[in-house]
Image (tube, coloured by chain):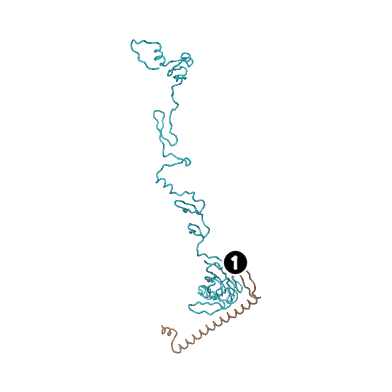
Chain colours: A cyan, B brown
Amino acid sequence: MAYKTFANGFPLPASDLNNFLMNQSVIVFADSAARTTAIPSPVTGMLTYLEDTNAYESWDGSAFVNITNPGDITAVTAGTALSGGGSSGDVTLNVDLSAVTIPASQISDLTATAAELNQVDAKIPKSTVTTAQDLIVADGASSVTRLGVGTDDQVLSVVAGSVAWADAGGGSMSLLASGTLSGSSVTISSISQDYKTLLVWIDNYKTTTDERELEIRFNGDSSSNYGWTDENAVLPTLSSEIRFGAETANDELYSFGKFTLSDYSSSNHWKLYEEVSISRHASQATRANFRRRGGFYNQTTAISSITILPRGGTLSSGNYEIYGVN
Amino acid sequence: MKPKITIHNSQSGKIVEREMTDLEFTEHENRQEKIQTERLAKQQEATQIKEARSAAEGKLLELGLTVEDLKALLG
């Protein structure tokens, strides 16, 4: 089909009438059956109107197809994280940025400034720590890990270049033995050789004979291999024990003394005895006898036992504690 | 009955209390005697010092002096 301009006096053959008028008009039919009967051989572009369906249909070369497309959208509603919308005309939807929440599982890539990302990266996740008392330490550049708490009395230290909880170096004191004084002597034997110094505490000591001190021997040695003095720069007389403590009063209350044996496990030198002690005075109950003694044991043998003896009578009370000190 | 002694093994913690052996008892007796001798000697020394002081003070008095006078002289 085509378009033709007719001029006055121009002959009008049936073909022109059919081609340029009938075939290009909107032909009204009661229904498609009437159309099929009336137009057995439609031409492409022919337009019909069916009264039973109120539909405009055009022949596309092989069938009549509906050309009316009214659509089924009646309104656009702003949903989650959107604003705007409408039910007629041009409709605009805007994203409500304040309402946008993106699940982490949906994030595969980010577009952000370096400063913004650095702020996030600089934060240490709480999940780094898993147990009470955990500490956070770096295990590399910009990398952290947890450090579990150590055991009682350990200190934070550096072990093989790494931060770690470790036993305190030096200053430790271990109780090797403790007990009460009784009888004619008390010997603490099999003393560990693993320490730098032995520290011996003796308190509330008393002998059955009033106002007597105690005496100390090492390694069961009762020979005259000991010397002691409570004065400076004197040459002590050798004796078969070292004196310990101040003379106790008529009761044992408040007496206390200590002595140390430095490097007691060495076999390179004689042994050094250092003692300080107090005991309540016999007649002046608010005052104490005070003794500071130095002494020696002129043997190089390591000290493995200590004997505590009364200087008269027997031991009627008292307590001892022996510590190994490093 | 001999006096008792106590031996405390600091490694095992075992404490044994027993009577002294004959040898230990002999040494114990000797030691007690020595202590007594030392104390007597010390007491005698203290007594002698006290007596000497008293005698010296008597002599000072005969000269019309006192201990305080002597201290003042010695400055």
The image quarter containing residue A314 is bottom right
The image quarter containing residue A67 is top left
Q: Is residue A121 left or right of residue A173?
A: left
Measured along the vertical axis of the image, is residue A147 above or below residue A305? above
**Secondary structure type for disc 1:** loop
Q: Pointer 1 indicates a residue of which chain?
A: B
Seen at 59% across and 66% down, the residue is B11
Q: Would you call the spot at circle 1 few (<14 residues within 10 Å), some (14-19), or many (20 or more)?
A: few
Q: Which residue is mark 1?
A: B11
Q: Position of residue B28 (x, y in %)?
A: 61, 77
Q: Position of residue A311 (x, y in %)?
A: 57, 76
Measured along the vertical axis of the image, is residue A43 above or below residue A144? above
The image quarter containing residue A2 is top left
Q: How many marks?
A: 1
Viewer-nearest residue: A235 or A16? A16
Q: Is residue A135 left or right of residue B15?
A: left
The outermost residue toward the left is A8
Image quadrant occupied by the N terminus of chain A: top left
Viewer-nearest residue: B48 or A130? A130
Viewer-nearest residue: A94 or A108? A108
Q: Is residue A185 left or right of residue A95?
A: right
